[in-house]
Each structure stands twice: as C-alpha cells, then as structure tokens.
Image (cartoon, rainbow, N blue to C red):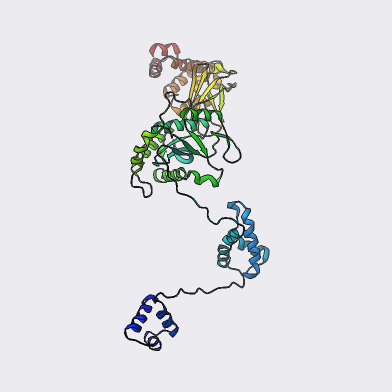
Amino acid sequence: MRSKVELFAAIRRDARIEGLSIRELAAKHRVHRRTVRQALASAIPPPRKMPSRTSPRLSPFRTAIDEMLRADLDAPKKQRHTARRILARLVDEHGAGDLSYSTVRDYVRKRRPEIAAEAGKPLEEGFVPQTHTPAAEAEVDFHDLWVILRGVKTKTALFTMRLSFSGRAAHRASLSQGQEAFLESHVYVFDRLGGAPTEQIRYDNLKPAVSRVLFGRTRVETQRWVAFRSTYGFEAFYCQPGHEGSHEKGGVEGEGGRFRRNHCVPMPRVDSIAELNALLEAWDDADDARRIGNRAMSVGQDWAIERPLLRPLPDEPFDTTLTLTPRVDRYAQIMVRCCQYSVPARFIGHRVRVKLSSTTVRVFDRDMLVAQHERAVGKGVQVLELDHYLEILLRKPGALPGATALVQARAAGVFTSEHEAFWAAARKQLGDSAGTRALIEVLLQHRHLDRAAVLAGITAALSIGSTSSDVVAVEA
C-alpha cells in the first residue's frame, strides 16, 4: 500500500507527463477529485485533521476537577492529586459512577499544565550547562550504603567527593554521619586526590558543617568546621534546602547512584569497615578508565591534568577526632553516642577524656591511654572488656558466671577453652568462690605476660593437677 506522499507524486507525474484531467486522474488513482486538487496544489499532503472528541459524561464534573488541580498548586509535591485519586473523590463526593479512569486521566493531563500556566507558574524548570575550571571546585554528599557486615545487614554512610572538572570521585564508608566521620573522610579523600580544591566545595546543609540555616545563602557554621576549612584553604557553597537545591550539586548526586549500582550490587560482604574501604578504594581506581557522557578523554586522563593544580595539603594534618569528657558510672562504663564502653574499674566516678573517631573509641586519663574499643554499630550497644572488671570480680567472684563482659569475651575468643578448663578444675578443687578467684588471678597475669605463655602455663598446671595461679605464672 502506497503512502500518501507516493500517491501525490504519482498524480502529479501523470498530470505532468500524460496531461490527464482532474476527473481522469481521480478515476485512474481511485481517489476523490478533492484529493487530486490537493496533490496538484502541493507535493506535501496536508496534515490530518484530528477529530475533536467531547466527553459529555465528564462535563458536569469539570469544575470540580479544576478546583482539585488548583488546590494542588500549593500542596506538597507528594501530596497532590493523581488522576486515580481524583476519580475516587468524584465517585465518593459527586456520585460520578459512570466515569472511566481513562477519561479522567486524559482531562487531567491536559488541564494540569493549563491551570499552572494560568497561575503564572513555570511548566518546566530550565538549567544552564556549566564549564568548570580544573581543580577549582568539588561536590560532597553522603549516601546510604547497605552491606553485609559480619553476616548482618548493616547501613553505612558512604561519603562521596567528586571533582567537578574531571569527574574523579573518592568514596569512604563509616558507621555514622557525625562530625568526626565527616572531617575524617575529608582528610582521607584529600590524600587520595592529591590535594584540595582551590576555590569551593558544594554541600547540602549537613549538621556537621551547618548549625543553623538563615535567609538565602547565609549559614551559621560550626566552629570546628570553620577551623577545618581554614586549615585546608577552601570555601563552602551551601545548596538550597530540599529538592530545590539538589540540582546545584547534581554531579555528586548522580555519582552516588552510579557507584552503588555498578559496584555494590549485590551487597558487599565484609568483616570490617576497613575491609569495605579497601574495596571502595580499588573500585575508585578502576573507574579511572571510564568516560563520562560524550567526553573524549577518560576520567583518569582528565584527573591527570587536574591533580597538579589542586591546592597542596597542610604540613600538619587537622585533628579530626571528637573530644568528649564523660563520667564513668558505677558499672565502669562510659556513654558515647548512645553506646556504652567499659573502662578500668579504678576510674569509677571519675571523668575521662575520650577521642572519638569514625572507627575507634580511645579513652585517656590525662595523657595516658587506658582503654580502646572498636566503635559499636547501632544504638544501645554495650562493648565491654573482661579485663576492666577483674578487680571488682576479685571481691565479687559470684558475679563472673553471668557477666556480660564474660559473654563478649567468649564470643570474641578471648576467653578460651584453656580458661574454661582451668575454671572448672579450680571450682572442683577449691569451691565456686575460691576457684573463681583463682581464675581471676590467672586472668590478671595477661596484663604483664604474653598471652600464649599464660595459656601454656595453664595447660602445664592442669597436667600436674594444680589450680594455683602461682604455678601458672612459674610455668608461663
């Protein structure tokens, strides 16, 4: 079957070569004479006229639909009427039982932009392409990253910094988005990229940096963040709050999604955050070979141009740890970010100084390190070390069997089968109280003797039927 353009060409050719009349052309090509006249007038067929369809059943409800759409002009984006919701309201409130969904949908699709235009609201927001100077700007954001951490599905915070010129990005995962993780991730990324941007970095209004959002672009920044920026010599550009400001750092917004889709599906399985960050570093290096959009050069090639132009890093790095001064409670614990950590019992009732990083909790008495823990995952978690309670347990040996610190020591492999065997033998020979004290005296030897030597001493003492801590010390 010929197209209408081909039909018009045939009619015009017969009229030109054979000199046929309009009647003869209509008869030959089996078309109306009106079509022949159109073909002779122009080789381009006239556009097809679309019939104007009316919806008589919808007519009584058009005013009600328009009112709903006008109400949407001031409603939150996710609480506006859909065509299905409008149909449901028409049925419930106006008895419109004969209307079909497609009729309402087509009318809403046509009227919504018309009503927005009548109200003076732009139909589509426009954007302007940008050209970035090498090493001048970067963008930063946090993204949620789910991993299998020690067999448990865990949400981590994926810090992402993306250089605006080359598109080179660096990622680092942590267990929180606190200020210590925020600053520590900056230091790590600056080291990875080889310097800091010379002008500005774009941010959301993150709590580690911004304590209060004022009118326009004015922000009240946290003091440590101001000191950090001054140390590394860059300015901060804060985007508009909410969805309206997301396009102002669209590069890092898209980078977070791209990176997770390409490298974190399925969810990475790791035993520690350090192992996860090693994977992220390797994936960042692998992305140097990719090209962004229609660029002629790869990310790595553009980064090679940009890297020498970055601002050199300061000689003395900024201390990113957060300093806290909690008081030790009567359970020899301190509360740090909704989690409890043990300290030696001799500090009960005292204030200690805590240096909190994204991965560790270090406890100091003045300048002496007295305890160190891996940072807990979640809230309300207790991280207890059995050694911190030994002095208390010497006075209260009956508290050892149900001690939370003992449960955690067993789970971590610190309290071994050798300890269990010695405890059982000591209780059998000396009784529960005296036998437990004998075990605690052995555990105290771990403070000044090598762990393997103490375990060997326990084995040797048991082989000769002794449950004396002195014998264990001699054999160790």
Q: Farthest residue toward the left?
A: 17
Vertical arrangement, residue 445 with respect to residue 7, above or below? above
For residue 375, above or below residue 396: below
> Where on the picture, by quarter, is residue 317?
top left
Q: Is residue 83 visible?
A: no
Q: Work out whether residue 278 or residue 194 is closer to the camera in this orientation and state it.
A: 194
- Image-quadrant location for residue 278: top left
Name the one closer to the observer, 378 or 197.
197
Q: Quadrant of the N terminus?
A: bottom left
Vertical side of 118 occupied by 127: above or below: above
In the displayed structure, 376 sits above or below 292; it is above
Residue 64 image position (x, y, % from top left): 66, 64
Can residue 214 be seen at all in this image of the molecule?
yes
Horizontal side of 349 relative to 188 (left or right) equals: right
Expressed as whole percent of the image width and height from the top left, the position of residue 158 reads 46, 38
What is the quadrant of the C terminus in the image? top left
Query: Is residue 82 or residue 457 the one in the foreground?
Result: 82
Identity of the residue drawn at 33% across and 41% down: 301
Identify the residue at image location x=49%, y=50%. 127
Residue 29, percent from left and from top: 37, 84
Total count of labels: 0
Residue at the location (56% across, 64% down)?
110
Give how far across and how far down residue 73 sits, in percent. 62, 55
